[in-house]
Image: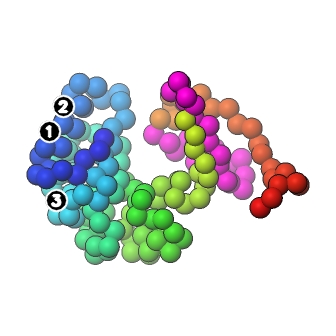
Amino acid sequence: MKVGRRPARLDTDVVRALRVGLGDDVELYVDANRGWSASESARAMQEMSDLGLTFAEELCPADDVLGRRWLVQQLDVPFIADESVATPADVTREVLAGSANAISLQRSGRWAHLWRIVGEYANVSIFDVDSNETLHELLSGLPLFPYMDIYVTPLAPHPSAIS
């Protein structure tokens, strides 16, 4: 769920209502698009600590490295960096600073392409991995993995492709 409004209670109340309405069997996570400060994020996540959130994404600004690292240490769910890791240097910053538990697979380059199939609740994805084991680890770690129908077709570069 997209969150990040001020005051944070506007969003925490909505997330709570969603949890009540959807029940405990539905995966639920929050993404603030860096809209809260580290302290606001910590307070909001504390307010939602009983909701069984799967993870939190981009709660506070990436340039607040110390605040973000502090926040990650406060959370009892994984913190995922997404739009703040647009380059390999950004990934390095997050990993070395300890300011994220995970990096979005698309930003890391392992989930190279993602397309929605028009008119269906389905997509086509291209993954850039070095082994079947790596692909299995990546796919089985997705929150919706237990509910997904997955078909894998290995691809290789075409000899006539223009780079």
Q: Mark 2, residues whose alpha carbon is within 10 Å: few (<14), some, or many (≥20)?
A: few
Q: How many marks?
A: 3
- Residue at 25% x, 71% y is 67
**Viewport quadrant of the N terminus:** top left
- Residue at 53% x, 53% y is 106
Q: Give the image location of residue 21, x and y in percent.
A: 23, 24
Q: Mark 1, residues whose alpha carbon is within 10 Å: few (<14), some, or many (≥20)?
A: some
N-terminal-most mark, 3 or 1: 1
Q: Circle 2 sits on which residue?
A: 17
Q: Amino acid at mark 2?
A: Ala
Instruction: Read off the magenta span.
Output: 117-143
Residue 146 vs residue 93, the one in the foreground: 93
Q: Amino acid at mark 1?
A: Asp
Q: Mark 3, residues whose alpha carbon is within 10 Å: few (<14), some, or many (≥20)?
A: some
Mark number displayed over residue 13: 1
Q: Give the image location of residue 159, x and y in percent.
A: 88, 55
Mark number displayed over residue 40: 3
Residue 139 vs residue 122, the one in the foreground: 122
Residue 102 vs residue 64, the one in the foreground: 64
Q: Tell me the element at label 3.
A: helix
Q: Tell me the element at label 2.
A: helix
Q: Farthest right residue?
A: 159
N-terminal-most mark, 2 or 3: 2
Q: Is residue 86 left or right of residue 151?
A: left
Residue 124 visible within the image: yes
Q: Farthest front residue?
A: 162
Q: Amino acid at mark 3?
A: Glu
Look at the numbered discs 3 and 1 and tell me whether their residues touch, using CB distance below 8 Å. no
Q: Tell me the element at label 1.
A: helix
